[in-house]
Image (cartoon, grey):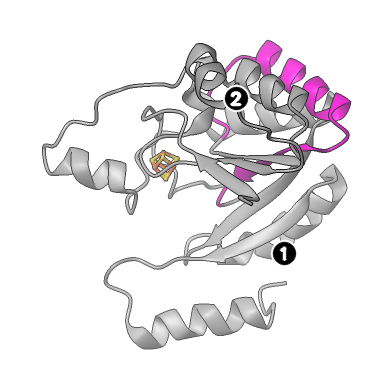
Amino acid sequence: MIKAIEIELTSACNARCPICMRTRLIEKGIPVKTEHYTIEDIKQYFGPIDMKDRRVKFCGVLGDPIACPDLYEISEYFLDKQVKHIEVSTNAGLKTTKFWEEYGELSERSNNRLEIHFAIDGVYTNDYRVGVNLDKVWNNVDTYLNAGGFASWQFIIFDYNKDEVPIARTMARDKGMKFITRTAWKNDASAAEQEEVRRKTKNRDYA
Ligand code: SF4
């Protein structure tokens, strides 16, 4: 039986992260056509399928799920179909305060089955997420959490933000979020530099 399914809800995104396939295509002059799945599409595809106890992940290769206009309705639909868990990975730089409040309330009603992974790569700086306004991000995160939303903070370690990891870890704990670090490197990083990042992450040397 299929236990988990990952769906790319949209090809839209507000960011231009340098290593993202979306950014690379645009830089090569290859346009990324904006398309979203709608709640009607999802009902048509998943209506006949028993989703009870399955996991759903909204992530993206070309888009950020928060840019999908029907994200709330689609999340609610899968929760009503008794999925075990929904994970939404987002840069958190879009949508209104009203949306985040209502989405937080939906998460709370779901008994933590709806979880956001906030992709925020820094406390004071968010350089990798080019085009994302950090003040708006924190307003959105706090609104969602204060409404009862369940979330984790996913932090990719780069040279520019590695000194912020201990602060971020404390902030995540104070806000009630699990803190997850990921490694990444610029394309020109040497093998030794890559290995050093792996070692530090494994040993939690940044903590
Ligand atoms: S937020 Fe995600 S989809 Fe958007 S540019 Fe960055 S990596 Fe790509």
Q: Residues within 10 Å of mark 2 (few under 14, many from 20)?
A: few
137 relative to 3, above or below: above
Could you tell me the amino acid type at mark 1? Pro
Q: Is residue 153 left or right of residue 28?
A: right
43 relative to 196, above or below: above
**Residue 177 visible in the current orientation:** yes
Q: Position of residue 87 (x, y in %)?
A: 65, 41
Is 23 magenta? The answer is no
Q: Estimate the spatial distance between the alpha carbons at disc 2 and disc 1, rounded to whole Å.
A: 47 Å
Count of marks, rendered view: 2
Residue corresponding to mark 1: 166
Q: Residues within 10 Å of mark 1 (few under 14, many from 20)?
A: few
Q: Position of residue 61 (x, y in %)?
A: 39, 44
74 relative to 11, above or below: above
Quadrant location of ligand 1? Answer: top left
Question: Which residue is the extreme one toward the bottom?
Answer: 192
Q: Is residue 104 left or right of residue 189?
A: right
Query: In this rendering, which labeled residue sits more in front, label 2 or label 1?
Result: 2
Q: Is residue 4 left or right of residue 63?
A: right
* Magenta residue span: 92-121
- The image quadrant where one finds the C terminus is bottom right
Ligand 1 within 8 Å of the CB at mark 2: no
Which residue lies at the image location 41% right of the left edge and 82% below the top edge?
A: 193
Ligand 1 within 8 Å of the CB at mark 1: no
Could you tell me the amino acid type at mark 2? Pro
Which residue lies at the image location 45% right of the left edge and 36% below the top edge?
A: 8
Which residue lies at the image location 47% right of the left edge and 34% below the top edge?
A: 64
Disc number for residue 48: 2
Q: Earlier in the sequence, mark 2 or mark 1?
A: 2
Is 106 magenta? The answer is yes
Q: Position of residue 110 (x, y in %)?
A: 84, 29
Depth check: give the residue in front, 10 or 201: 10
